[in-house]
Image: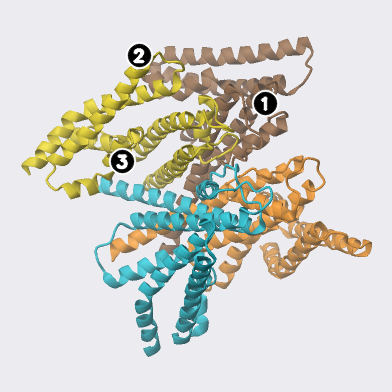
Chain colours: A yellow, B brown, C orange, D cyan
Amino acid sequence: MDRQQRLWTWEQTAEPYLFAASLLFLTSYTVRVLVPGLSPGWSTFWEIVTAVTWGAFILEYLARLLLSDDRRHFVRTRWLDLIVTVLPLLRPLRIVDLHERMQRRRDHPRLALEARVMAYAGLTSLLLGFAASLAVYHDERGAPHADIRTFGDAVWWAASTLTTTGYGDATPVTGRGRVTGVGLMFLGVGLVGAVVGSFSSWLMRRFRQEGEA
Amino acid sequence: MDRQQRLWTWEQTAEPYLFAASLLFLTSYTVRVLVPGLSPGWSTFWEIVTAVTWGAFILEYLARLLLSDDRRHFVRTRWLDLIVTVLPLLRPLRIVDLHERMQRRRDHPRLALEARVMAYAGLTSLLLGFAASLAVYHDERGAPHADIRTFGDAVWWAASTLTTTGYGDATPVTGRGRVTGVGLMFLGVGLVGAVVGSFSSWLMRRFRQEGEA
Amino acid sequence: MDRQQRLWTWEQTAEPYLFAASLLFLTSYTVRVLVPGLSPGWSTFWEIVTAVTWGAFILEYLARLLLSDDRRHFVRTRWLDLIVTVLPLLRPLRIVDLHERMQRRRDHPRLALEARVMAYAGLTSLLLGFAASLAVYHDERGAPHADIRTFGDAVWWAASTLTTTGYGDATPVTGRGRVTGVGLMFLGVGLVGAVVGSFSSWLMRRFRQEGEA
Amino acid sequence: MDRQQRLWTWEQTAEPYLFAASLLFLTSYTVRVLVPGLSPGWSTFWEIVTAVTWGAFILEYLARLLLSDDRRHFVRTRWLDLIVTVLPLLRPLRIVDLHERMQRRRDHPRLALEARVMAYAGLTSLLLGFAASLAVYHDERGAPHADIRTFGDAVWWAASTLTTTGYGDATPVTGRGRVTGVGLMFLGVGLVGAVVGSFSSWLMRRFRQEGEA
């Protein structure tokens, strides 16, 4: 019980630093992918930022693993934490978890559940769509016969994938780009699910309220 | 309270004029985009119509802002009004708001909620799809290597985007056209959400009625 | 009231003949589109079958219009009947209406509502998808630069449209073909809506049953 | 009643063997499609594995048919069993059935219904997507003008079909490949339905819990 307490204290303390580190990681990745012709000095600087923040994520995960009572239980129930530690570009997936935990602590008047679901889905999609655009642009720009040649193409492709529209006028051709693409497609199905589910749930509630009135 | 009353009176009085102005704005934009070889006189005429109606939207928004008790609250809660004032082609988004407010006032027997959701979604999609077709056709027709060369192509692209089908046989290639496209895709996800949500809500209600009978 | 009775008697008597006429119409259209090199005799025969059945639909609609008490009310509430009379290829849209009316009369133990919705959606999609494939193949096969060159291409396009997949490897290029396509896309959104809505309604019911057990 | 008992005993005994046979069938099909330049000996070996397992499925179905009290009832209610016996690549469709029957027997604490629906939908999609990739790759690789030339292309196409994204940068061109594709599209609509339905059902339950708390 004592250890569990220390884990909680740790997580509360570490949260803002982790959030800052996430922003730093995304910034460094963005700069390294999007800014052409970085001077060697700046290039090294941003590579170090990437490495240091990534290292911090891994150390923080190991620290929490050590603090936890039951380590196998920790790994099994916190599998999302492990994934976002290995692939920091997926960190936006933790937004839901983070915000829900913060709300449970503060107990302030909350938004309707549907509004939160829509906000989470929207924000996660936006951030992961941006991260996927960066990753795909990074993988595709040097590939021969690539359709995605500018960052604009990559964003356009990401938007058409997330909404399951899928024009196909610009699609990844490299293996790594396509793996990112498959992930984004399934995220898109989830996004549609969140929008549709919230809509249908909101309609049902409105109906019950009208029936009572 | 007195001011709030005056704001309400204003909104009731302004509504029909705004509606007429919206139609004029859309007509002038449609004519300027679709009618080839306008004589200089007519061209100037329609440009003035566009400018005057747009100016009227801005003035009306400012008037309401001045009439409101709490201006920051007004800007925050009426963010949709601000958006449709800056981009008048998005005015159909206010249909829901407008109709709901009218119904609250009149209190006449209303349609089932699902029927209204479907009607709003359908009408908004139709009008915004038409506006998006115009805007994309306007941006694309002069672009080199463009797929969208006729207004028919633009409508075909808009329909395939709104339904999240996304053939990709004709897609925008300019930056502005693609920004319009991304907006239309997310509107499409919302349209699918409205259709599916209404369907599922209607099914649930029917079931409860059959269970009671 | 007497007239209403006669209208009902008429509709009950006419139903099987209309159904047979619908099958004949679809058969004659199918033969005329799909069988290459019909002899002039057969070609004329099938054209007459098309004309006679279409004429029968129109006469039957006019007969019902004459029998009805309030003609404007008849036209307004039976708008679907008018549409399928003018465009007989859309007749499968009446399946729901027809079957529901038959069930109200017979009162035999019915399927769960979700199963019926799925069955209606499936059957309507199948028949309208087939009709759309025929119509598009008919319009496209002679067009220059057409992607849809065989009936197989048309069916493949119709399936990818109905499921809102939209590959875009074969799409209509003629105006009439694209109008058919837009109709099929929106039907596809409805199909997805029916599948998803039924699923979600079924899940909710199962949950309530498990909660009670 | 006695016969029904024997059928149940049979099914319980046969289940693990059938599961092993399904894995063997999929393995043999995978090896035959994906491993290039098999020696004649190995090629014959894997063909025999395919034939024997397929034969076992057919014999087991016939055995159950003989054991059943009412054979027409068996064929009508177990139509899925007949389909997966004729086309063993569709065997993953039986996962739901199998697991539900196992759970009814064991009565151990079960997952929430939505979690199970998501797990079934995910696993079925994964396995059928893999089987469809294999089948389409097998049919397309020798076809002239084919877009799908590597197994990677086939997987990429299957993912974009299952999520109803439908890029269309690589699509089947052969008749058999397209039949597989149509099946996968409708499976995709079902997958989206399962995801969306579960989401909406989960949201509704959460709301009721929050309302009670």
C94 horizontally vs C139: left or right: left
Residue at position x 51%, y 23% in the image: B12
Q: Are marks 3 and 1 in contact (CB under 8 Å)?
A: no
Looking at the picture, tell me which residue is in the foreground, A70 or B98.
A70
Q: Position of residue D55 (x, y in %)?
A: 50, 77
Where residue A83 is drawn, which disc sits there?
3
Q: Position of residue A160 (x, y in %)?
A: 53, 36
Residue at mark 2 shares a chain with residue at mark 1 = no
Looking at the picture, tell me which residue is in the foreground, C39 or B8.
C39
Q: Earlier in the sequence, mark 3 or mark 2?
A: 2
Question: Which residue is labeled 1 in the image?
Answer: B137
| Parent chain of label 2 | A
Where, by quadrant of the figure, is residue A101 drawn?
Answer: top left
Q: Is residue A203 above or below residue D129?
A: above
Q: Are marks 2 and 1 in contact (CB under 8 Å)?
A: no
Residue B204 visible in the picture: no
Could you say whether the residue bearing mark 2 is in a helix, strand or loop? Answer: helix
Residue at mark 3 shares a chain with residue at mark 1 = no
Q: Name the amino acid type tagged 1.
A: Tyr
Question: Which residue is labeled 2 in the image?
Answer: A41
Q: Position of residue A148 (x, y in %)?
A: 55, 30
Residue C49 visible in the picture: yes
Q: Residues within 10 Å of mark 3 (few under 14, many from 20)?
A: some
Q: Position of residue B52 (x, y in %)?
A: 62, 12
